[in-house]
Amino acid sequence: MNDMTANRSLWLVLGLSIPILLSIRRSLNRFHRSSKLPENYERVLILGASSGIGRAIAHIYASRGARVCVVARREAELETVAEECRALSTTAGHGEYQAGGKRVIHVVADFSEVEDMVRVRTALETEWRGLDTLVVAAGVSALKPLMEVAGVEKKGKLYTPPQADETALQKTVEVTAAAMKGNYIGPLVAAVSLIPLLSTTSPSPSILLLSTLASVIPAPTRTLYGSTKSASFMLYQSLSIEHPDIHFAFVLPATVEGNFRASAVDGGEVREADPNTKGLKREVVARRCVKALDEGDGAVFLPWLMSWSQLALWAFPDFVKWRAMKKYNFSTDDAKHDVPLF
Ligand SMILES: NC(=O)c1ccc[n+]([C@@H]2O[C@H](COP(=O)([O-])OP(=O)(O)OC[C@H]3O[C@@H](n4cnc5c(N)ncnc54)[C@H](OP(=O)(O)O)[C@@H]3O)[C@@H](O)[C@H]2O)c1
């Protein structure tokens, strides 16, 4: 073997061993929540559990014997989910009661209403005397470009009507307030009402915020949705610094199958091709959420490749914007501003 070949082999071995050593270190440092909190003692509150990903998360916790409290506004759907959880828990061999409290409870509530969240907290204190895990899965969608919300259409350089009048501006503010209520005020009321209870009653307090890829990567038509989800993502990241005794996990999925778009606060049309079948499976997202809580993960992007999306936006902004326009079937006949305006 000559010197050049020996050098190359050395670099190759070094290059291969760094990721292996890093992954060994990661697994040695792995946080195992179950050593502090047995799965069948865990008390889990899921906000937004009457359908979709929240419902799938409730099923997972119920199957492994955790105590589960499901919350949402639609009473009939919520009662069905509570029944499903009881059945899954019983099938897995767990009793109706755990440590003197009911294993599955449900509270019909709006997580952005103060009185409702006080009722939820009282139910947890009465039934379980505390809380270990808060899952914030509730949220609302918004699907229109912002000027469309105001009823102003753009063709070339012309706007019709030429300006958003007072009524149109007022309507835009109301739609925005509804998006803020569902995606920011709700997470805020949940955090403020539950952080002291989590922190003082759990051996391993944890919070998971179900955010979205749209909260970190801008997309046309998701103007209000992405910006309001981004606000709650930043809120919880800041809270994680203010409350280092609580583990905060964040899951940021791309499009997920289901009827989330039906919750649109702006009544916007669905623009993606076949959104219900092409998205991530909600059970896959739910499993990853539970894993993030069990193993102490921080921010988790789904699919995994999207972990590089912010770097891609920085390195190739035009490509990422083009992909976003294509995904949401959005086009504009405006010329791009290649030349500075002044
Ligand atoms: N679907 C996607 O493509 C996608 C992608 C990325 C991230 N996400 C995020 O995933 C989360 C769940 O979405 P999903 O697909 O499971 O949609 P979903 O089926 O519409 O579920 C939303 C849940 O939130 C509840 N909810 C909404 N507003 C509420 C409120 N004010 N108070 C209490 N509960 C409320 C709904 O129940 P009620 O109507 O009965 O109250 C429902 O149970 C959302 O936060 C969303 O931003 C979704």
Image: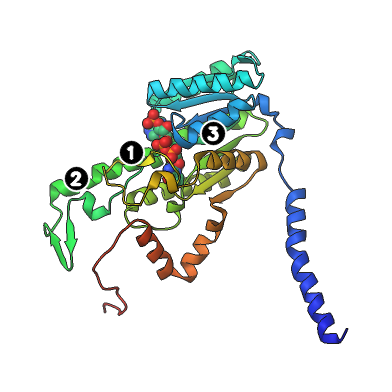
Would residue 211 appear left or right of 4 to someone viewing this image?
left
**Residue bearing mark 3:** 57
Which element carries disc 1, helix, strand or loop? helix
Would residue 266 appear left or right of 190 to someone viewing this image?
left
Classify the position of ligand 1 by quadrant: top left, top right, bottom left or bottom right: top left
On-image quarter of the N terminus: bottom right
Front: mark 2 or 1? 1
Q: Is ligand 1 within 8 Å of the beta carbon of the residue shown at mark 1?
A: yes
Q: How is the image coloured?
A: rainbow
Residue positioned 82% across, 83% down in the render: 5
Which of the marked residues, 2 or 3, is nearer the chain's N terminus? 3
- Residue 138 is situated, as x and y percent measured from the top left of the image, at 43, 36
Which element carries disc 3, helix, strand or loop? helix
Measure the alpha-carbon separation of dots 2 and 3.
38 Å
**Residue bearing mark 1:** 262
Residue positioned 84% across, 81% down in the render: 6
Q: Amino acid at mark 3?
A: Ile
Residue positioned 53% across, 46% down in the render: 251
